[in-house]
Amino acid sequence: MLSGSAPRTSAAAQAPAVRQRRKHHLWVLYFYGSAIGKKAVMAVTGIVLLGFVLMHMVGNLKLYYPDAERHLNAYGEWLRTFGEPALPHTGFLWILRGGLILSFILHIHAAVSLTLMNRQARPIKYQGGRSYAAADYAARTMRWSGFIIGFYVLFHLADLTWGNANPDFIRGEPYNNLYYSFERVPVALVYIVANLLLGLHIYHGAWSLFQSLGLANPRFNQWRRTFAAVFAAAIVIGNVSFPIAVLAGAVDEPEHITGEARLIEHAHTLGTAAETLPGVTFHA
Amino acid sequence: MSKNLNLTLRVWRQRGPADSGAFGTYKADGINDDMSFLEMLDVVNERLIGDGKDPIAFDHDCREGICGSCGFVIDGRPHGPQPGTTVCQLHMRHFNDGDDITVEPWRAAAFPIIKDLVVSRAPFDKIIQAGGYISAPTGAARDANSTLIPKPTADLAFDAAACIGCGACVAACPNGAAQLFTSAKIAHLNLLPQGQPERWSRVTSMVEVMESYFGSCTNYRECEAVCPKGISIDFIAKMNRDFLQAKFRDKKKLAGGPLGDAG
Amino acid sequence: MPELNASVPPGPLAEKWDNHKFDTKLVAPQNRRKFQIIVVGTGLAGGAAAATLGEMGYNVKAFCFQDSPRRAHSIAAQGGINAAKNYKSDGDSVHRLFYDTIKGGDYRAREANVHRLAEISTQIIDQCVAQGVPFAREYGGLLDNRSFGGAQVSRTFYARGQTGQQLELGAYQALSRQVELGSVKMYPRTEMLDLVMKDGRAVGIVVRDLVTGEITSHSAHAVVLATGGYGNVFFLSTNAKGSNVTATWRAHKRGAYFANPCYTQIHPTCIPVSGDYQSKLTLMSESLRNDGRVWVPKAKGDKRPANQIPDAERDYYLERRYPSFGNLVPRDVASRAAKVVVDEGYGVGEIANGVYLDFADAIRRLGRATIEQRYGNLFDMYAKITGDNPYEVPMRIYPAVHYTMGGLWVDYNLMSNIPGLFVIGEANFSDHGANRLGASALMQGLADGYFVLPTTIAGELATQLNQPPVSTDSAEFRAAEQSVKDGISRLLGIKGSRTVDSFHRQLGKTMWEHCGMARNTAGLTAALKEIGQLREEFWSDVRVLGENESLNQSLEKAGRVADFLELGELMCQDALHREESCGGHFREEHQTPDGEALRDDDNFAYVAAWEFAGAGRPGVLHKEDLNFEFVHLAQRSYK
C-alpha cells in the first residue's frame, strides 16, 4: 500500500456539483449541447429576428406614403404571391415564417436552458445585495424583456395576423387591421411598451451577438455598441411612430381601396365568402 | 497624513459548508486609513480573539495582489470599490468614518464556502488541467530565440496571462460563469506560436470542463469591470471564436494528429 | 567535529555536471512507476520538480498549503530571471554568470553548484519559452533583456514586472498536465507537519488537511522539500503571510542539518513601514534601480517636499560611493547604505524611515510612456499602497527582509544529510552563498526543479529498486502521527491570553533589531535570551481558539510561529558564531574602515550546518569547508 488513509479528504468535503453532459453522437446536437454553442445559436437566430424586425418596421413605413393603404395592402399581397408560380400561393411567406418560427423557438429554447444552467450556477444569491459595475439595465433585464416580448408577439399575431384579438380584423387588409388596432388606446400603449422593451432587448442583444460569435477586434469594437444603439433606436422610433400617428389622426381611415378583385380572389382562396369572414365590416 | 476611522462591519459568518450562515456585526474603531482592508480585518480578529470569539476566516497570502488567494465581496462588489485592486491592496483611505461595510464570500455553486469568507476554487484547477498548458517535456526545448514572436502578440498573450485566478469574475457574474478566467488562459496559449499544435483540443476540452461547473456568459461585462488585472472580455470573444472554429473543424485535425495543422 | 561530504564530482569545473550526469545511476523508464516520490511545496522548484518527475514516469504526490498549487509565493517575484544566453553580445558567458554569482554571494557558495546553475540557466529559458511563458520581446520578435544588480551585462529575462508569476504559472501548468494524466496526485490545503524516518532514511511525511483537520501519513521512496524560505521569522518581510519554516524545521528536528541560517537577504527597495498594524512589506522590484536614482537630502531632517530640494542639495549616495556600479550595486550593499543614511538622520517621509528612489531623470530622458511600459504595474502598486503618485513624486523605499540564503544543508545531489530527503529551491542553503543576486532565485528554483533534482534523485532511488515503500501502518508512521496530534492538542490546550500574532510580532521585532541588517555580539546575546523567554511564554500563554477538526487559521499560524521561535534562536546562534561579515551577514565588529563587509576567509570559509539538539539547546555545528579551486577570493568591490 503506497499511501495511508485517504477516505475523508478535503477535496471530497468541498467538491462542488459537476454537471454531466450527454455526449451526443450527432454533431449538431453535441454542439448545441454546449453553452457556447447555444449562445452562438442565440446570436444567429437573433440576427434572423433582427432582420425580421427591421424588415417589418421598414415595410410598415409605407403607412406614411401618400397612398398608404394601397401600398401597404399591396405589400402584404406581394408577400403572399411572391415566387408564384414556382412557389405555391403564400409559399414564400411560409418559408419566411418557417425560418422565423424556428429561430424564435431556438432562441427561446436556448435562452431558457441557459437560464436554468445559470440559476444552478448560483443557487444562493448575495445576501448583502450586490452592486453592478458594468451591466446596464438592458443587459440585466434581457430575460424579462424577452419573456414579455414573447408574450406580446402572441398577442400581436392574434391581433393582426389571426385576427381573434381584433374585432375589426379583415384578412388580407393589413392597413385596416393596423389602423383599427391602434385606434384602441390600450392596445396602442401595450404596443408602445412592448417596442420599448424590444429596443432594450436589441440594445443588448445586437451588441452581445458579436461577443457570442467571437467577433471582437480593437478596430471595430467601439462600433459594435454604436451599431446596437442605432439599430435599437431605429426599430423603436419606427415602430412606436405607427400607433402615435394613428392616434394623432395623421393616418387616413381605411377606405378598403385594395380592390374587389383582390378581396374576392382572397376569399376564394379561403373557400369562404368575404362577407362571412369574422369581424369583417364594410364601410362602403 | 493618516487619520482614524470608526466603522461597522457586517461580515458573513459560516462555520462550514453545511452550515447556513448569517451576518455578524462588528465594530471596527480606530482604524488607521493607511491600513489595507486585510490589515483592518487583522485588527478586528486580534480583538475578537482577545474577547474569546472565533476570528473571521479569510484566504490571503502574498498581500501584494498577485497570488490570487484573497477576495470577497465588499458592499456588493467583488474586491470592493476600487477598480483594478485586490482586497489586499485596497486601502482604508477609500472609506469614510462611520461607514457600514458589508463583507460576503464569493457565491457560486462551483465555489462552496469552507468557512466564513473562505471558498474552494478547485474547479479552476480542473479547468487548467483540462488543457491550460503547452505540452513541452522538460529538456526537449529548442533555443528560446529560434521562435520569433512579434511584440504585439507577446504583449497580448501577456495581457491574458496576467490572470491571478482569484475568482472575482465568477463572483461578479450574475450567472456564476467562469468565462473570463477560462478565456484568459486559452487566449494566452492560443495566441502564441508554441500553443498552436494543441489550440483546438485545448479550447474544446477546457470549455467542456468549465461548463460542467459554471454558468454561461450573457455578456454582462461585470467580470471585466471587477477583474483586478483588467483582463478584457475580448478574450471571451476569442474563446468563443476558437471554440466555434474548433467545432467546425475536421475531427482528425482536432486530435492534433499527423493531419493537424498549425493555423 | 565531523566534516560534511558534499559529494562534489571530480574533474574540471565545467565538466563536473556532464560527467556526473553520466556517472549517476539511472532508473529505467519501466521501473520508474515502481517509485513513489513526495514533493512538498509547489513553487518554482517544487512545481517544476513534481511536473518533471511525473512526466518521467514516477508516481508523485505533491502537497501545498495554499488552495491551489498556482499560488505558491514564487508567483510574487517581480523582476526577472538570469540566464547566460549572451543574446545581447555584451560579453556574458556561463563562466561570467558563475563568477558574478560566486562574487555576489561573497565567496560563501559551493563552486561546483554555482557553475552547474550557470550552465543550466540557458536551458531554463528555452524550457519556459516552449511552455508559453510570455517573456518580454523586442519589436523584431527576439527576447528582451534588462540588467540587474551585481552584474555589468544584460542577462535578465523578464515578463513585465511579473516574471515570477509567469514562470510559476508555467510550472503550475506543466504540473496540471501531469495531474490530469494521473502521474501526480495533488493535495492542496494540506500542510506537512512531520518527516517520518526509518533506519536513518526519510520514508514519508505526516500532513494535516487544513480544511478537515485530518492527520494522515504518506509514504514514499524519497521526500523532496521545496517549501521556500524562512524570512517570516522577522514577521515583517516581503514573503507571503503563509510562508513558513515548518516543513524544513520539522525535518531539521528529525536530523536534517540547517545550514547558514543567519544569511538573510535584506532587499533594498521596499515600501517603508507605515504603522504598527503593518502586516507585511511590499517589494518594489530591483529592476527599478535600472532607471531610478537613489538619494537623500544633504541636510539632516530636511522636511521639504522632494521636488523642492535642488539637485545640489541631494546626496546620490550610491552613485557617490560606488561610481562603477552606481545604483546597481548588489542588494546587501544597497541595503546597508540605506540603513547608514537613515540611521544618521537623513531619512525621508513622515517618520523619516526611507530614502528616495527618483524617476524624474528617467522620465525626462525616456518619456513617461517608456517608464510606464517598463514598470507600470509596480508604479500602480506603489500608488495603491502609499497613495502617492510615483510619476510625480519620488518613491520612498527602505530595505526589508526578502530572501533567506540559508536552509537545509544539501550535497551536490541536493540531498540532505538524511538519505532519501532532498531539498530544493530557497528551502536549501543554496547556491547563493551569503548574498543572492537579483533574478537568481527564479533561476535556482527552476534549475533545481526542472533539471538537477530529476537527474540526481535517480541515483538515490536506484538503490531502492524493488523495495516497497514503508507501510503507513508501521510503528514509525504511527508514532509520528501521534506526535503531530499531541503537538496540536498542546497548542489548543494552553488557552492563554496572548494571540499568536502578538508573539510573532515580538519575535520579529527582536530579530530585526538584533539579527537584521547589522549584528553585534551584545545584540545577538540579548536576542538569544529574549527569544528563549518568548518561546517559554508562548508555550504557556498563547491563545489558540477553536478546534482541530475544521479550518482553523490561528492553529495553523500557531504551529508555524512555534517553529519560528526555535529557528530564531538558531539564527542568532549562527550569527554570533560567524565572527566575520559576509554578504547578508554584517557583523559591526568586522568592517573595513569605509564600512564595507570584512570577511575572514582563513577562519570562516565554510558552510555552518547545524544539528538539532533540542529546543532551547544550542545546535551542534558541522562544517563543510569551501574550497575555491577556480575563483580567486577577493574583497568584493563595486566601486
Image: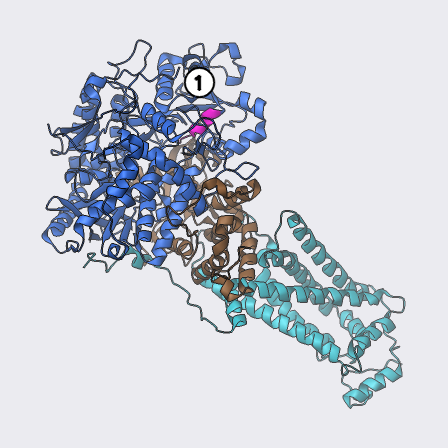
Chain colours: A cyan, B brown, C blue
Near-viewer residue (C153 or A81): C153
Left or right of C249 in this view: C62: right
In this rendering, the answer to whether C215 lies above or below C349 is below
In this rendering, the answer to whether B140 lies above or below C567 is below
Left or right of B222 in this view: A45: right
The answer to which image quadrant residue B87 occupies is top left
Part of the protein shown in magenta:
C283-290
Q: Position of residue C378 (x, y in %)?
A: 47, 32
Near-viewer residue (B46 or B60): B60
Can residue C299 be seen here? The reply is yes
Q: Residues within 10 Å of mark 1 (few under 14, many from 20)?
A: many
Secondary structure beneath label 1: helix
Near-viewer residue (A101 or C473): C473
Determine which residue is flagged by label 1: C326
Q: Position of residue B140 (x, y in %)?
A: 39, 47
Q: Position of residue B256 (x, y in %)?
A: 47, 60
Left or right of C243 in this view: C315: right
| Main SS, magenta residues | helix
**Residue under the image location 52 percent in, 71 percent down:** A27
Q: Is residue C379 magenta?
A: no
Q: Is residue C284 magenta?
A: yes
- Pinpoint the chain carrying mark 1: C
Can residue C239 be seen here? The reply is no
